[in-house]
Image (cartoon, rainbow, N blue to C red):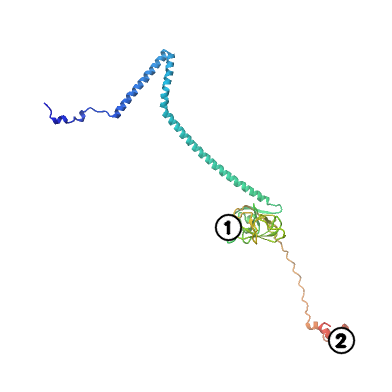
Amino acid sequence: MSRPPSSRLRPAPARLRPARRTSFARRDSNLALLGALISGVILAFALLLLVMQSVNPELGSRMRGATLDALSPMISVARAPADGIRRIGGFVGDHLRVVESNRALQAELAAATARAGKADVLALELQRMERLIALRRPERRLVASGVASAASANAGVRSAIISVGTADGVRPRMPVIAADGLAGRVTDTGRTAARIMLLTDANSRVPVKVLRNGWTGLAMGTGGTLLDFAYDIASGSDALRVGDQLVTSGDGGLFPPGVPVAVIVRTDQAVPKARPLANPTGLGPVMVEAPWLPPPEFVPATPAPSEPDRPVVPVAAAAGPAQGAPASAQSQAGLSPAQTQFGRP
């Protein structure tokens, strides 16, 4: 019995068709077969080497050497990826170690820089203290040592605060000396701090002299950063020069003589200008000294003893002789009555 024509063109059901392997499956099976073949060859060759080693050791040794020579290129090729990964890991590790070492070195450099900065600050402070000690003289009496801070400037007023007060023996009008020279004098005192008037204060007046030629004058504050130097010319053959140093003269008895005060910076004006040697904004350690000469003590004078009042001579009696006086007294004096009355011939 023949099938109708339509049934010949109809495809067979999928469950009745033979299953086709995909390309991935075929590749996997081929690789498995190749691996099995290579493994079998290696195992057979290994067995052969074992047999040859037991039968003929010398021939077995030569075969092992030849095998190693033949397999070394393949081993090198096989190890190339692992060696590359190992080298890359080494490079990365070296880079990380270099970075870490660089950071450690940078931290050490920063610490060394900080230590060097502190050493420079300490060396500067030591130099300032040495200069401050060099300004001391045996005949001057040190009252207290402190640190100046909180310098202020307001409407011509230039002042600073020092860290010593009445508890340390500080009193008003005491001179204050910094490492570079005279700083000013004490104006107000507290128990643990005091206020000083700086040289640049508008009310500051310091008797000074020119160290080079001995001219004397006053270093007067202007409320700014410079001082005015008012002086008397002692010699017409000399002139004030830029760079001349001013030191205290000791006049007035407040400031000790010989303390550096300022240096002349301008002489082209009617009143020369000088720059204070002690920086008002960075005085640092300071010394408070007693006044160079103690204030004079006035001894009270003993009052004069009282004298009794003397009687007042009348004018008429002083002008002429008393009434009833004998004329012989007048004649004995050789004066006429008119001469006797007016007191002249």
Number of disc labels: 2
Which one is earlier in the sequence, the residue at label 2 or at label 1? Answer: 1
Q: Nearer the viewer, residue 263 or 109?
A: 263
> Which quarter of the figure has residue 206?
bottom right
Residue 109 lies, with reference to residue 190, above or below; the image says above
Q: CA distance from mark 2 to mark 1?
A: 93 Å
Residue 284 vs 92, above or below: the answer is below
- Which residue type carries mark 1? Ser
Quadrant where the C terminus sits is bottom right
> Few, some or many C-alpha atoms within 10 Å of disc 2 (few <14, some 14-19, many ≥20)?
few
| Mark 1 neighbour density, 10 Å: few (under 14) some (14–19) many (20 or more) | few
Residue 118 numbered tag: none
Residue at figure coordinates x 38%, y 18% from the top left: 45
- In this rendering, is residue 10 above or below 279? above
Q: Secondary structure at mark 1?
A: strand
Q: Residue furthest top?
A: 55
Residue at point 58% right, 57% down? 152
Q: Is residue 327 left or right of residue 242?
A: right
Q: Quadrant of residue 37?
A: top left
- Which amino acid lies under the numbered mark 2 shown in the image of this protein? Ala
Left/right of residue 100 with respect to residue 144 in the rendered view:
left
Which percent across, then down, holds residue 340?
A: 83, 84
**Looking at the picture, how far across and down is residue 291, in whole percent?**
68, 57
Q: Position of residue 125 (x, y in %)?
A: 62, 48
Residue under numbered circle 1 = 152
Q: Which residue is rendered at x = 51% and y = 38% of the image?
A: 102
Dot 2: element: helix
Left or right relative to 48: residue 100: right
The residue under label 2 is 327
Front one among 32 and 5: 5
Quarter the N terminus occupies: top left
